[in-house]
Amino acid sequence: DQQVKQNSPSLSVQEGRISILNCDYTNSMFDYFLWYKKYPAEGPTFLISISSIKDKNEDGRFTVFLNKSAKHLSLHIVPSQPGDSAVYFCAASAGTGGFKTIFGAGTRLFVKA
Amino acid sequence: KAGVTQTPRYLIKTRGQQVTLSCSPISGHRSVSWYQQTPGQGLQFLFEYFSETQRNKGNFPGRFSGRQFSNSRSEMNVSTLELGDSALYLCASSPVLGSYEQYFGPGTRLTVT
């Protein structure tokens, strides 16, 4: 039972355009959501997060939107750059600690120059 | 500050053997979590250690075990290896137990033949 789903295994976007990565979750107890970025041969690195009391969080080119009623969150990257090409993991937590953090399967983003 | 380091980076083992993976957290971090990453499955939580004690455990068989030393370094052991254990094993550290944000190492790629 996948509680966190990233339904698009891959996404290809032209440099300068917007990249939108989507994530759906099923557990209404999740109260904190994170996005991690992973380059080949490296571990995931924290990118941006959002608490369930908010519906938007912005950090530079990265914005995360949360729609609690739809149990959906998305990561927007504007403008996309070739260096953004990586695998992006969505994660949701029902409390603190790795034990309660569930990761999606990841979406591979290709940004074409 | 040095990041999370994991050794070895790559490992090839035969079915039935056992393996030990090592993780050194960021200096000052006392919580270490382990994850298994397989294609299409995201990151699956294995266990979390804090102050040399296992605090949380994921849904993995008893062949998977771990420990943490007084300097916060952690080891993970898998006994009686199976083909399905082939995966990227990631270690993550946090300053305290139960932190939402985790800092990942590059992982150990284990191949079981």
Image (cartoon, helix red, strand yellow):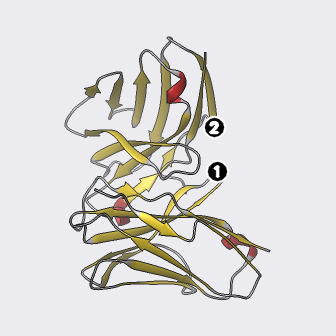
Nearer to us in this view, B33 or B45: B33
Where residue A22 sits: x, y (%)? Answer: 49, 31
Total label count? 2
Question: Is residue B98 or residue A102 the one in the foreground?
Answer: B98
Q: Amino acid at mark 2?
A: Pro
Identify the chain of the residue marked 1, using the numbered disc in the image.
B
Residue A9 circle label? 2
Q: Is residue A107 left or right of residue A18?
A: right
Judged left or right of residue B81, residue B78 is: left
| x, y percent for residue B27 | 26, 66
* Quadrant (top left/top right/bottom left/bottom right) for the C terminus of chain A: top right
Residue B88: give x, y in percent of width and height.
Answer: 60, 62
Which residue is farthest top?
A16
Q: Residue at x 33, y 44 (%)?
A: A33
Q: Which residue position is annotated with label 1?
A: B40
Residue A77, quarter of picture: top left
Q: Which x, y percent locates residue A93?
A: 33, 53
Reply above or below: A106 against B95.
above
Q: Chain of mark 2?
A: A
**SS of the residue under disc 1:** loop
**Mark 2 neighbour class, 10 Å CA radius: few under 14, some 14 to 19, many 20 or more:** few
Tag 2, which secondary structure?
loop
x 44%, y 47%: residue: A26
